Image (tube, rainbow, N blue to C red):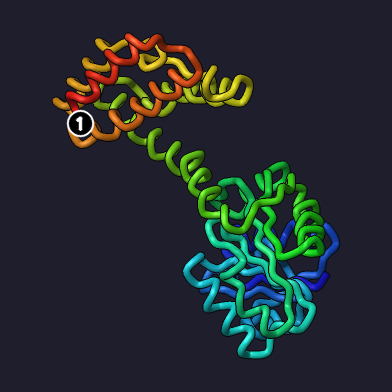
Amino acid sequence: MRVAVIGAGTVGTAVAVLLQRAGHQVVGVSGRARTRDRAATHLPGVPVREPADAAAAAELVVIGTPDDAIESTVAELATAGALGAGAWVLHLSGSLGLDALRATVGVGAHRLALHPLQTFPDVPAAVNGLPGSWIAVTADDEEGLRVGERLAGDLHGVAFVLADELRPLYHAGAVFASNALVTVSAIAESLFTAAGVPDAGAAMAPLQRASLAHVEALGPARALTGPAVRGDAGTIRRNLEALGRHAPDLVPVYVALARSAVELAARSGHVPPPSRAAVEDVLAEWT
């Protein structure tokens, strides 16, 4: 297919690179100031064009803009006559559904939403990380699902169908799986550093790698360790007292996560009711 990427940032550029390798023809990309440098580095020979010009030359238009700009970008392309009847238009947002592409309906184009369940700090990492990632596919009909699954395959991803109305819930899961993990890692690193651990990032890395490996191998319930699953109310109290002295702003975070941990442990039958009650009593004192 002839492909245009409108909003060729990190993910859009990586998608273009992989689709090109799969045999598609990238007829143009568009974007902000750094797009030209990204195209020269990763897509040599692919022209940087105005959005309407790139889209008008394509059979597949990939919208890689920030989420808040997707709907207006597609509407502008439709108004400009850049989306031909029968063209495919897809966005890469995890939280938005097909309604963000509503302008395609009036011009006879088809709409798709594809979202790789992966984190992409830069283009090389995205090109290397996309293959093997799971890719959520949302479409209006069976034909759209077939096209979406084929494109996911061209990206060397693992396609799965995601209901349109459940995309925001799915994306909330992605935020917990990635962004929250990174944020909690930063918190842990700051506490280790305050406690005098040398090279805190390196020190905690083996622990984190092992924890994620156990989650993958055993599932979260069986991988859970620590004071919540032991019902160790005394340790939780000492943790909270230390945070109260040294990092009081983190007390609510610790309490919320401890509550979730003890609930997980209780659901899996790993903490006796009396021990759970003791933990919950301590957490209530700090709420």
Residue 272 position in % (x across, y down): 40, 9
Q: Is residue 128 visible?
A: no
Label 1 environment density (alpha carbons within 10 Å; few <14, some 14–19, many ≥20): few
Q: Is residue 20 visible?
A: yes
In what element is the residue under mark 1? loop
- Three-letter amino acid code at the position of disc 1: Thr
- Give the left or right position of residue 219, taking residue 151 as reference: left
Residue at horizontal 68 percent and vertical 61 percent from the top: 42
Residue 232 position in % (x across, y down): 32, 10
- Give the left or right position of residue 175, taking residue 195 as reference: right
- Give the left or right position of residue 148, taking residue 65 as reference: right
Q: Which residue is mark 1?
A: 287
Q: Which quadrant is the N terminus positioned in?
A: bottom right
Residue at horizontal 48 percent and vertical 25 percent from the top: 208
Residue at horizontal 65 percent and vertical 62 percent from the top: 113
Residue at horizontal 81 percent and vertical 64 percent from the top: 143
Q: Quadrant of residue 179?
A: top left
Q: How many marks?
A: 1
Q: Quadrant of residue 146?
A: bottom right
Q: Residue furthest bottom?
A: 80
